[in-house]
Image: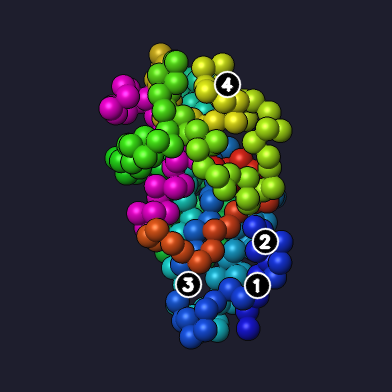
């Protein structure tokens, strides 16, 4: 029996159901604004070894690891270096690929880029808004209202009351300091896409939600990534 530590329960649990021979795994990949450091490469290696082990046990594994190519860090770095953000992204992706080759890492079955899934993100945000989980803030950003989701904090153990404002954005116009942005209004000099809420770009957390949903469906077996992503990214 293959067991892994379940971050939500804090216990070792069977990875597969009885008779299950296929597994779907989504790993949160890199935000491509700089080369991978040793911590990034360690994370890649851990899941590389897990996939190899599972396949050696004659399991069918669908391994998805995304690339975050739309993010504040990318835009800020591109502006600092006075270069096009897409040029920066391509350069960094090529550099990271060479690092992976030197480590002998296998390629994921799917390596989606956030910029390729904007339409799916917009549809997902519209669904959340229609169900009352999302709202348009005073400055035009669309935010997720964490107090509308009763299980918020169950992964990381965080309490909404104790959360500090501004994990990745300014918190002034949100209904609650713990709410997070799903769609950001465009600022001068930044890349943007059109949406029902005006020109803008997706927030970090909705990106992986849309990509995993599209490629793996509403449920999959394993969601992995660096331990530093447990909160806020994986929680959100």
Give the crowd class for mark 3: few <14, some 14-19, many >=20 residues within 10 Å. some
Secondary structure of residue under mark 2: loop
User: Which portion, as a residue range, is magenta?
Assistant: 190-215
Q: Nearer the viewer, residue 48 or 19?
A: 19
**Residue that carries the numbered disc 4 in the rendered image:** 171
Q: Nearer the viewer, residue 209 or 64?
A: 209
Above or below residue 87? Residue 16 is below
**Residue that carries the numbered disc 2 in the rendered image:** 9
Give the crowd class for mark 4: few <14, some 14-19, many >=20 residues within 10 Å. some
Per the model, the C-alpha gap separating discs 4 and 1 is 38 Å
Q: Nearer the viewer, mark 4 or mark 2?
A: 2
Q: Nearer the viewer, mark 3 or mark 1?
A: 1
Q: Nearer the viewer, mark 4 or mark 3?
A: 4
Mark drawn on residue 23: 3
Mark drawn on residue 13: 1
Per the model, the C-alpha gap separating discs 1 and 2 is 9 Å
> In the image, 170: left or right of 133?
right
Q: Nearer the viewer, mark 2 or mark 3?
A: 2
Per the model, the C-alpha gap separating discs 4 and 2 is 30 Å
* Quadrant housing residue 15: bottom right
CB under 8 Å between discs 3 and 1: no
Give the crowd class for mark 1: few <14, some 14-19, many >=20 residues within 10 Å. few
Per the model, the C-alpha gap separating discs 2 and 3 is 20 Å
Per the model, the C-alpha gap separating discs 4 and 3 is 39 Å
Secondary structure of residue under mark 4: loop
């Amino acid at each position: 029996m293959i067991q892994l530590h379940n971050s939500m329960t804090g216990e070792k649990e069977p990875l597969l159901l009885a008779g299950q021979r296929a597994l779907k795994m989504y790993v949160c990949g890199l935000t491509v604004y700089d080369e991978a450091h040793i911590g990034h490469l360690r994370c890649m290696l851990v899941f590389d070894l897990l996939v190899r082990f599972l396949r050696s046990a004659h399991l069918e594994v669908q391994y998805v690891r995304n690339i975050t190519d739309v993010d504040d860090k990318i835009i800020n770095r591109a502006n600092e270096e006075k270069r096009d953000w897409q040029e920066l992204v391509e350069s960094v992706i090529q550099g990271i690929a060479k690092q992976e080759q030197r480590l002998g890492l296998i390629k994921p079955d799917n390596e989606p880029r956030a910029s390729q899934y904007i339409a799916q993100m917009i549809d997902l945000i519209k669904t959340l808004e229609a169900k009352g989980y999302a709202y348009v803030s005073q400055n035009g950003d669309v935010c997720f209202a964490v107090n509308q989701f009763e299980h918020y904090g169950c992964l990381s153990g965080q309490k909404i009351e104790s959360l500090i404002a501004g994990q990745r954005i300014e918190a002034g116009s949100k209904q609650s300091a713990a709410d997070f942005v799903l769609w950001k209004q465009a600022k001068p000099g930044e890349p943007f896409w059109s949406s029902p809420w005006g020109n803008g770009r997706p927030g970090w957390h909705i990106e992986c939600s849309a990509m995993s949903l599209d490629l793996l469906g509403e449920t999959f077996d394993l969601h992995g990534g660096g331990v530093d992503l447990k909160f806020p990214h994986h929680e959100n």
